[in-house]
Amino acid sequence: SDEFKMVLGALELYDKTVENAMTRYEDIFMLPDTLNLSADMVTQILDMGYTRIPIYEKKTQDDDEDRKNVVALLFVKDLALLDPADSHNVMKIASIYNHEVRRVLVDMPLRNMLEEFKRGEYHMALVERLVEQEDKDPIYELCGLITLEDIIEEIIQCE
Ligand code: ATP
Ligand code: ATP
């Protein structure tokens, strides 16, 4: 039955980590900090259907690499109040609202992630993994994104 599956799903939260539920790095919809929004682009962004969009710092010509440098979050609702007289650079808009970028480690137990979200301060986190480096301090590398909805999907097991 569905109830039985849900109980199992909830129990499995004890064995699973953020990695099992997150949206993977390649699938994150993000925008570069250099982007200036046209009306068309705003429409396209709204059509994506995401509420929160990471903004990454454009440092090189390599988008795949640059996407790891997330520096801000744009909330789609922030676009509602755009003044036609202002610059529509995404980073400028994100800086006005300055939503905190929360980060968690990929091996965090899903149970703990759920507790965090339940506290209500945030509902999305960037997921990072620790990468060891020779002769240097380890670095944190972006590998995904997780929201409350991802955990709920694990509980009700509707893959
Ligand atoms: P909300 O439902 O709070 O309005 P939303 O629909 O943007 O926000 P969620 O419902 O929290 O997002 O999550 C739905 C799914 O979309 C989850 O799997 C989540 O990981 C994924 N997701 C959320 N934001 C992004 C994004 N910017 N890029 C890719 N996937 C995302
Ligand atoms: P996060 O949880 O990722 O930090 P958030 O808490 O800022 O995001 P939501 O979780 O989407 O945003 O909404 C939090 C509360 O703010 C909800 O009660 C929601 O109804 C309310 N809210 C969201 N958008 C607006 C808006 N444009 N104007 C007024 N209230 C809003």
Image (cartoon, grey):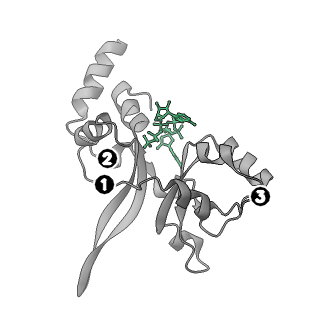
Alpha carbon distance from label 1 to label 3: 42 Å
Q: In the rendering, at what x and y percent does residue 89 appear?
A: 67, 64
Label 2 lies in ligand 1 vicinity (Cβ under 8 Å): no
Q: Is residue 46 above or below residue 144?
A: above
Q: Which mark is residue 106?
A: 1
Q: Which mark is residue 85?
A: 3
Give the side of residue 11 with respect to residue 50, left or right. Answer: left
Looking at the picture, tell me which residue is in the foreground, 15 or 50. Answer: 50
Residue at 44% x, 32% y: name it.
159
Give the side of residue 71 with respect to residue 32, left or right. Answer: left
Q: Dot 2 corresponds to which residue? A: 18
Q: In the rendering, at what x and y percent does residue 138 appear?
A: 26, 75
CB under 8 Å between callouts 2 and 1?
yes
Q: Quadrant of residue 37?
A: bottom right
N-term-proximal mark, 1 vs 3 = 3
Residue at the outermost bottom position: 135
Residue at 75% x, 46% y: name it.
43
Inspect the image, locate mark 2, and give the three-letter code of the amino acid beneath it. Answer: Val
Give the side of residue 88 with respect to residue 145, left or right. Answer: right
